[in-house]
Image (cartoon, rainbow, N blue to C red):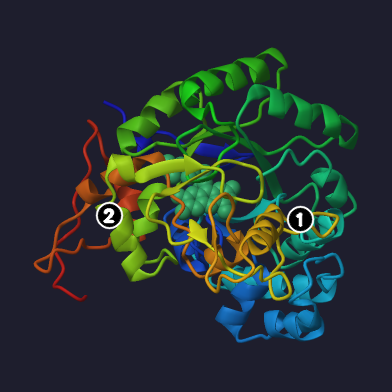
Amino acid sequence: MKRVDDFRLKFGKKEFVPIMIGGMGVDISTAELALEAARLGGVGHISDAMVTDVSDRRFDTKFVKNKLQIYKHNIHNSDKSIIKFDLGALAEATRRHVESTMQAKKGEGLIFVNCMEKLTMNAPRETLQVRMASALDAGIDGITLSAGLHLGSFGLLAEHPRFREAKLGIIVSSVRALQLFLRKNARLNRLPDYVIVEGPLAGGHLGFGADWAQYDLATIIAEVVQYLQTEQLAIPVIAAGGIFTGSDAVSFLEAGSAAVQVATRFTVADECGLPKKVKQEYFKASEEDIIVNTVSPTGYPMRMLRNTPAIGAGTRPNCEAYGYLLDGNGSCAYITAYNREVALHPDLKTLSVMDKTCLCTHMRNFNCWTCGQTTYRLKDTTRRLEDGSYQTLSAEHIFKDYQFSIDQKVTLPEARPVGA
Ligand SMILES: Cc1cc2nc3c(=O)[nH]c(=O)nc-3n(C[C@H](O)[C@H](O)[C@H](O)COP(=O)(O)O)c2cc1C
């Protein structure tokens, strides 16, 4: 019986344990988590979502405060189009986040940064270009393009000295999205180094519509593998979404995937950025508690726990401080929803906005509990402590469980004393 460790992910002549920990913004996939994946010979991701805020928290910079200072006169104005990110500050925040991670890297693995196109920041092209270029300048091993079709993203990097040397990959949820990406980038003569195929059971935003349940990862992977073979394109395919055990991973590796990308099992790792209390919510969740809704202003469906505090919260839009989801015209679907509720209930002190949420504010405060479909199984991966809570696990334990387990088994961690 095979185990994940019998396979290797190959980039050129280099070989890696075929386990990638997926990017989880905002700082849920921390540097500490990514570093463990790299130390153990796999691939870890940090995320550049809300990176100025992440830098403020990690390095005591004042990027968010400075931006708020400039725009605070606009707080009561529903038109947010004047709010612009300082590109120099964005570059500096990215540099700090990436550089400090890369300086701490040990082991043979790699660290990539997850770059979401949907973080449009009221200047989609300029801000994405700065984020990616700055990550390359700071020595990141690779960039995973996500949350968007990224038809122009390679073009934004084409002049960068590391464009052909760094690993560049894209997340897609269909063979059509991949075909479109390859067609649009053909003139650059630079293929992606890997393609992550993310199915409908993943956490975060989904690359599917309301009919997500009709799709299945194995089928999409088979279509992608077939297409690449027909086109004679040797691009490693990485399967993501709902892969919960080492045996699940092996089935994808045997079916032509070069690696797997996993995330949900690591949401309860000690190194994961979620607060301790939120990790307990993930452990406690039952299958009925996991829902897919459209509260994200990005327009993509998103999976989350039903009791997510962000749902229904009538938070005043915080774009003067954050504003990461402002589109190229300075709009965001949450601002529209919020203003509608204010107009309907002018005298209400505490508003409820049900259809959209202020994703920046709530992701920043870990109040949007996005998760994968397998979250309800997390309780089976650990021990229950005397006080009724669940024991968190080391990232190393989870990683090695994927790497070495067989027969759909999940190895429980060593017992720890309460509070440790
Ligand atoms: C809490 C959480 C946050 C996530 N955030 C992001 C993100 O910011 N960007 C992204 O591309 N994918 C995100 N994802 C998707 C993961 O990177 C990964 O591809 C997917 O969840 C793998 O499936 P699994 O969680 O079933 O293992 C997130 C997943 C989780 C669980």
Give the farthest residue toward the left.
Answer: 386
Query: Where in the figure is residue 284, as x and y percent of width and height?
Result: 25, 54
The reply to whether residue 16 is in sight is no
Which quadrant would the C terminus be assigned to in this image? bottom left
Q: Tell me, yes or no, if residue 160 can be seen here.
A: yes
Measured from the top left, where is residue 407 in percent x and y?
22, 30
Instruction: Pick out the residue farthest to the top.
Output: 230
Q: Residues within 10 Å of mark 1 (few under 14, many from 20)?
A: many
Check residue 283 in the rendering and tell me which mark sits there, or answer none: 2
Question: Looking at this view, is 160 or 128 the one in front?
Answer: 128
How many labels, in total?
2
Q: Amino acid at mark 1?
A: Thr
* Location of the N terminus (image quadrant): top left
Q: Element type at marker 1?
A: loop
Task: Pick the residue in front: 356 or 379.
Answer: 356
The quarter of the displayed image where residue 277 is located: bottom left
- Residue shown at the point (66%, 85%) measured from the top left: 61
Q: Quadrant of residue 237?
A: top right
Relative to 242, residue 221 above or below: above
Residue 179 versus residue 328 in the image, above or below = above
Side of 398 relative to 9 (left or right): left
Q: Quadrant of residue 81?
A: bottom right
The label on residue 120 is 1
Residue 379 is situated, as x and y percent measured from the top left of the image, at 23, 50
Residue 367, image x, y percentages: 46, 64
Left or right of 103, for residue 339: right
Query: Which label was assigned to residue 382?
Result: none
Left of 291 or right of it: where is 121? right
Rate crowding at label 2 as few (under 14), some (14 to 19) or many (20 or more) other CA atoms within 10 Å. Answer: many
Residue situated in front as seen by the camera: 296 or 177: 296
Q: What residue is shown at x 29% (from left), y 44% (from top)? A: 376
The CA span between labels 2 and 1 is: 33 Å
